[in-house]
Image: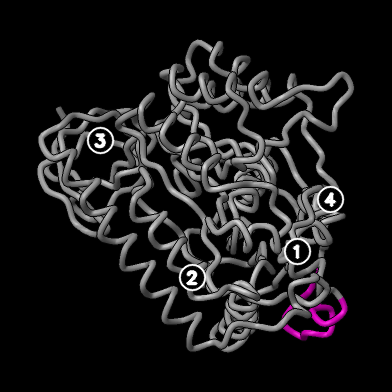
Amino acid sequence: MTSVFIHNFGCRVNQAEAFDWSHRLGEAGISMARDWHQADWVVVNACALTARAEADVRQFLKKIQRESPGTRILVTGCLAEKTQEELAHNSAVLRVIPNSLKDNLVAELLALAGTGQRHQDRSVFRSRALVKVQDGCDAHCTFCIIPSLRGKSRSRPLEQVVECARAVTERGYQEIVLAGIHLCAYGLDQEPQKSLLDLLQALVAIKDLRMIRLSSLDPRLLPRPLLECLVTEEKICPHFHLSLQHASEPVLRRMGRKSTPAEYLEILNFLRTGRPEASLGADIIVGFPGEEEADFIFLRDFLRDSPLNYFHVFSFSPRAGTPAAGWKQVPENIRKKRSEELRRLSREKNLAFKESFIGRELAGIVIKKRETSFEVLTGNYLKVMVEGRPDLRPGQLVRVVITEVGPVISRGRVS
């Protein structure tokens, strides 16, 4: 049987696309390999958000070529959209499929690899279902290349998303993760216009769907009715990750983001008060062009004093074709120093947040088996190792009592 390994770089949207591809390939008789060394084909769903992301993709392609030169490679994703001609001349790459043709990926792979006896082992790929509901972005922040690679915002019809959620629930998934390049813009491009709130209200009505997790949220598109839904609907996981990017108003204006720290704080306080157990995270860019020491200090103090319990810190990476790439850059050594300081602060806040749950019981999904233990992901995004329960299985909904916490993995027992 032909086998395929899908390797994702970057965002949750790429992961959701790969989740869908794996199911459709399995239905057509393609086996999903657990390791790329064992695969006949490797599909690389590539990222181009930062220079580091591009470098990681190229390094992986070289590794395959070096260690398994007979493996056939198909590259798609944002890097394929950005450097299609370059990748087409890479002798290790058999096919390049840009984002604009991603919908044809499964059909093209089947035409190349053939089909076999219907087969689907969901445990090979994911224990939680990822559902892509939106693609593209109309925001055009001054630092971001994604609108040029993903195109305008396009929302999947609400009825289609609900049908997909029902289908994965019938396949046994207890949790779905909603993914979108600009998730909070869901439905705004449709006629008649819909919203993320409309979608959530339709999804929570699905009887057997137990947990709904949201990917990144834009604070500019979080109206009060949506916020109230997030804090009152029990099926929505208490885990909210916001694309804040910065807190200094001068920097936010240069980024092209019409937000203020006061608005950020109001949203974060509302979420913390409404869901005290919620994990609150943010994307933060450090060293944006024009970021003065005072801007950084304001950002650091805002993050320290805010209800956020973790943040993903990105050192600014100029992307050709964006306005910010042509502006005077903050020296690399300063960007690195500031990034390290914020990452240290994030680790400290996140550990303190986890420690507050010792002895408490939380709902979670068994996401993988690790030798004699199982890893559980709680609704508020704590990774918990459970020992001595060989009866557990990936995808199972359980309740765990946290007994010990660490910087990455905590420990607990199933109650």
Q: Which residue is mark 2?
A: 294
Q: CA distance from mark 3 to mark 4?
A: 37 Å
Q: CA distance from mark 2 to mark 3?
A: 51 Å
**Vertical comparison of 37 with 228: above or below:** below
Q: Secondary structure at mark 4?
A: helix
Q: CA distance from mark 2 to mark 4?
A: 49 Å
Q: Residue at coordinates 45% horizontally, 38% vertically from top-left?
A: 268
Q: Earlier in the sequence, mark 2 or mark 4?
A: 4
Q: CA distance from mark 1 to mark 4?
A: 31 Å
Q: Nearer the viewer, residue 117 or 216?
A: 216
Q: Earlier in the sequence, mark 3 or mark 1?
A: 1
Q: Which residue is mark 1?
A: 142
Q: Earlier in the sequence, mark 3 or mark 4?
A: 4
Give, as a three-letter code, the residue at label 4: Asn
**Classed neighbour count for the residue bearing mark 4: other residues with Cα under 10 Å, few (<14), some (14–19), many (≥20):** few
**Classed neighbour count for the residue bearing mark 3: other residues with Cα under 10 Å, few (<14), some (14–19), many (≥20):** some
Between label 2 and label 3, give the one nearer the viewer. 2
- Percent x, y for residue 243? 57, 50
Residue bounds of the magenta highlight: 85-96
Q: Earlier in the sequence, mark 1 or mark 4?
A: 4
Q: CA distance from mark 3 to mark 1?
A: 47 Å
Give, as a three-letter code, the residue at label 2: Ala
Q: CA distance from mark 2 to mark 1?
A: 21 Å
Q: How many marks?
A: 4
- Percent x, y for residue 58? 64, 81
Q: Which residue is mark 4?
A: 104
